[in-house]
Image (cartoon, grey):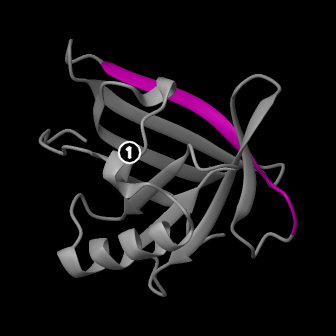
Amino acid sequence: MERYLGTWYEIARLDHSFERKLDNVSARYSLRSDGDVQVINAGYRTDSGRRKEAVGVAKFIGAQDVGSLKVSFFGPFYGGYHVVELDEDYRWALVVGQNHKYMWILAREKELPQSIVDQLLAKAEALGFDTSELIWVEHDRADT
């Protein structure tokens, strides 16, 4: 888990209500004193330019060396967070939810080489995700 902590930039995602109209999206993960993970998702609304931030908690479903967690930003309601592909140097990750409605491509940098993107898209498609529906996140602000 320690290697996964820190800031990740959202490269692409499937659309869902809690990130709708957001660009320059990042997620910051930090370990809490109780062993759970604090998650801070932040981005800027494309219609107003205002920053939006959500603070949540992630709890491991099983062993802490397995990337399978449940995450909550809304009280007692949790969603799945499963790392299904991860670079050996923790430079990029493919994360999926509990169903085919949730998928993210994350990276430590604001851009990924096309060869890596193609690899992650192939993995997502093999898992049954419709990658034609992905939103490609802009990272055009210097303050993100």
> Mark 1 sits on what residue?
26
Which of the 4 quarters of the picture holds residue 74? top right
* Percent x, y of residue 93: 47, 69
| Residue for point 38% across, 45% down | 26
In magenta, the rendered stretch is 51-62
Which of the 4 quarters of the picture holds residue 101? top right
| Residue for point 45% across, 81% down | 87
* Percent x, y of residue 10: 36, 51
* Label 1 residue SS: strand
Nearer-the-camera pick, 117 or 100: 100
Question: Which quarter of the rendered picture does the N terminus lie within?
Answer: bottom right
Q: Is residue 122 above or below residue 136?
A: below
- The amino acid pointed to by label 1 is Ser
| Residue for point 29% across, 75% down | 118
Nearer-the-camera pick, 29 or 61: 61
Residue 62 falls left or right of residue 9 = right
